[in-house]
Amino acid sequence: MNLKIVPQRVINEINKISRVAGYLWERQWAERNGGNISMNLTGFFSDTKIPKTSDFIKHKFPIEASGLYVFVTGAGCYIRSLIDDIEAASCIIYINKEANGYYIVWGGNAEGFKPTSELASHLEIHIFNKKNNSKNLAVLHAHPIELIVLSHHPIFNDEEKLNHSIWKMCPEARVYVPRGINCTPYSITQSDELAKSTIYAFSYRDIALWEKHGATTTAEDVEKAWDFLDVANKAARLLLTSWAAGFEPEGLSNEQLKELKNLFKI
């Protein structure tokens, strides 16, 4: 990879993204061109002059996106391509001060490359994070199998019951997905309605589980975002396995869940 034009800290984050892409592909959570990843890298470029590798591309953005450097996967690109051809399947864009266009400052090497069609939705989340939780820089959308199955189940209509059922399946779920899962009602992909529902989800939950589609999460970096989905999906798999075996799992008791909450100061 030709990463000489970007700071070492950015290289480190790109390497994390490539590793997580491998995890997603191995788990079958990012079939074909399913899933996308973005990261607000603005703070990583604050003291660096970066040459622009593309002509100015006109595009209307919210003014709050002015001056952002954002890593984003490409439209129609496959997550698996991030494993060994990340410069062709993703890019870093710089949005100009007027927020009426952008330059590609790294990547986007594939012929006809364009940033993901979900760019607007990702930017809305990054803008939300800037105002409400500035530590969260990464956004990950994928198709974790067992969580999607739960979104087809009647339990999806009772968010409190779904979260209690997930948390009680293993201590890690209670500790590492402490705010739980939002049951995001079905909306067509790329819609404003879905973007708004997802942003609302992040105001009080760790994961937005999109009904009959997939899951989206945001965290400090892409590996921490992966951890949210990995742990939650493990608990979902345990729950579904219990049901498939023909019994309702006892799970951790309310007292045991409370002990975990107190021990880890959740």
Image (tube, rainbow, N blue to C red):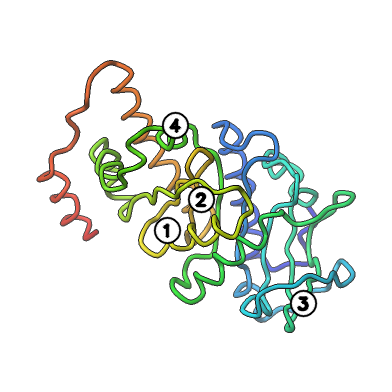
The Cα atoms of the two marked residues, 2 and 4, are separated by: 15 Å
Q: CA distance from mark 4 to mark 1?
A: 19 Å
Q: Amino acid at mark 1?
A: Ala
Are discs 3 and 4 less than 8 Å apart at CB? no
What residue appears at the point 44 percent right and 31 percent down from the top-left corner?
Answer: 149
> Which residue carries the number 4 mark?
149
What mark, if any, has residue 107 been given in the picture?
none
Judged left or right of residue 182, residue 51 is: right
Measuring from the top left, give residue 66's x and y in whole percent.
Answer: 67, 79
Which residue corresponds to mark 2?
216
Q: Earlier in the sequence, mark 3 or mark 1?
A: 3
Mark 2 burial class by Cα count in 10 Å: few <14, some 14-19, many 20+: many
Residue 236, image x and y in percent? Answer: 36, 34
Residue identifier under label 1: 201
Residue 51: give x, y in percent of width and height: 83, 73
Looking at the rendered structure, the secondary structure element under dot 2 is: strand
Towards the viewer: 175 or 197? 197
Residue type highlighted by circle 2: Thr
Q: CA distance from mark 3 to mark 2?
A: 27 Å
Outermost residue on the left side: it is 255
Q: CA distance from mark 3 to mark 1?
A: 28 Å
Relative to 247, 256 lies left or right = left
Question: Do tag 1 and tag 2 residues touch (Cβ < 8 Å)?
Answer: yes
Query: Label 3 is placed on what type of residue?
Result: Asn
Give neighbour class at mark 3: few <14, some 14-19, many 20+ (Cα, 10 Å). Answer: some
Give the mark nearest the N terminus, 1 or 2: 1
Asked whether, in this view, residue 262 is left or right of residue 122, the answer is left
